[in-house]
């Protein structure tokens, strides 16, 4: 029975500061480091032995994976890093404080930007300090200016089909360290959650989720590891 372990990165410095992050490469906070280690211990205690790992090209997810694998004595596992697993791009909101934006434009508008299925935040300004045009990790990538959850799904799912699903079908136990919204994209797909209901799905930092799947990758169960 294929097994899939999903973990959202531990708390980042901008989670702590309550700032919109998206593709901006923010490191883990001290609490995030501890959450990542605890996540590794939970995977080990559940008797799970991943054989292949996938993560984004963002430090907070890569470090979370490494810290967890270190706790599991499995840092040697093969890891594929790919931008398709990056967080949803937060466009012009990148770097802004979520509470300050709520005070400015209202809670409802911020909720729409954060959780609506297909309404993207305003695009990043061309001269923004958060432009990633010159970042070598995106040398051959068309970096979006903003993304809705729907846009995120449209780049996560082809990568899932191309890279991750074949590994699961061939019998690997897969671990993915990624982000709140790239994981919401995957969970929406795997658990068949509707466009309306996905609005209510929140994923805590550093708490691994175990999927047990049928051979054709249909969900049998989805549980948090204690
Ligand atoms: O800022 C972000 O990139 C994400 C995840 O931390 O936030 P949100 O909860 O608004 O999707």
Image (spheres, helix red, strand yellow):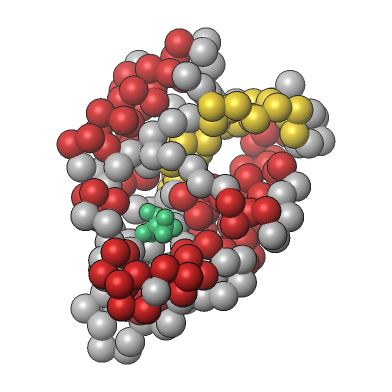
**Quadrant location of the N terminus in the rendered image:** top right
68, 159: nearer the viewer: 68
The image shows residue 109, relative to residue 166, as above or below, that is: below
Q: Residue 61: where, in percent of width, then height?
A: 36, 44
In the depicted structure, whether residue 121 falls above or below residue 154: below
| Up-down relation of residue 75 to residue 89 (above or below) | above
Q: Is residue 194 left or right of residue 77?
A: right
State whether residue 132 appears in this view. Answer: no
Which quadrant of the structure image shows residue 37? Answer: top left
Is 156 displayed left or right of 74 in the figure?
right
- Residue 122 higher or lower than 10, as above or below: below
The image quadrant where one finds ligand 1 is bottom left
Q: Position of residue 140 (x, y in %)?
A: 43, 72
Residue 153 shows in the view: yes
Looking at the image, which residue is at 57% across and 66% down?
A: 116
Q: Residue at x 27, y 57 (%)?
A: 18
Residue that extends furthest to the left in the rendered view of this protein: 30
Front in this rendered view, residue 184 or 47:
184
Task: Name the side, left or right, on which 205 lies relative to 170.
Answer: left
At x 57%, y 75%, the residue is 119
**Residue at (38, 63) in percent of width and height:** 22
Looking at the rendered structure, the number of numbered marks drawn on it comes to 0
Q: Position of residue 136 (x, y in %)?
A: 30, 67
Q: Position of residue 210 (x, y in %)?
A: 58, 27
Q: Work out which residue is located at the far bottom of the displayed protein and give it.
A: 126
7 and 57: which one is in front?
Answer: 7
């Amino acid at each position: 029975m294929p097994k899939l372990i999903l973990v959202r990165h531990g708390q980042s410095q901008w989670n702590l500061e309550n700032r919109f992050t998206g593709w901006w490469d923010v490191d883990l906070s001290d609490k995030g480091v501890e959450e990542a280690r605890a996540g590794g211990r939970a995977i080990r205690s559940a008797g799970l032995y991943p054989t292949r790992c996938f993560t984004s090209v963002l430090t907070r997810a890569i470090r979370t994976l490494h810290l967890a694998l270190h706790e599991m004595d499995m840092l040697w596992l093969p890891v594929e890093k790919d931008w398709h697993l990056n967080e949803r791009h937060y466009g012009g909101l990148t770097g802004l404080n979520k509470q300050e934006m709520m005070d400015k434009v209202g809670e409802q508008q911020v909720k729409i930007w954060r959780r609506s299925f297909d309404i993207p935040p305003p695009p990043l300004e061309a001269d923004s300090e958060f432009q990633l045009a010159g970042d070598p990790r995106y040398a051959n990538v068309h970096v979006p200016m903003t993304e809705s959850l729907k846009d995120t799904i449209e780049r996560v799912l082809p990568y899932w089909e191309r890279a991750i699903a074949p590994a699961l079908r061939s019998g690997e136990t897969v671990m993915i360290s990624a982000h709140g919204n790239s994981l919401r994209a995957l969970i929406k797909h795997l658990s068949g959650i509707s466009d309306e209901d996905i609005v209510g799905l929140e994923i805590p930092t550093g708490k691994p989720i175990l999927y047990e799947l049928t051979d054709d990758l249909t969900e049998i169960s989805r549980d948090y590891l204690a």
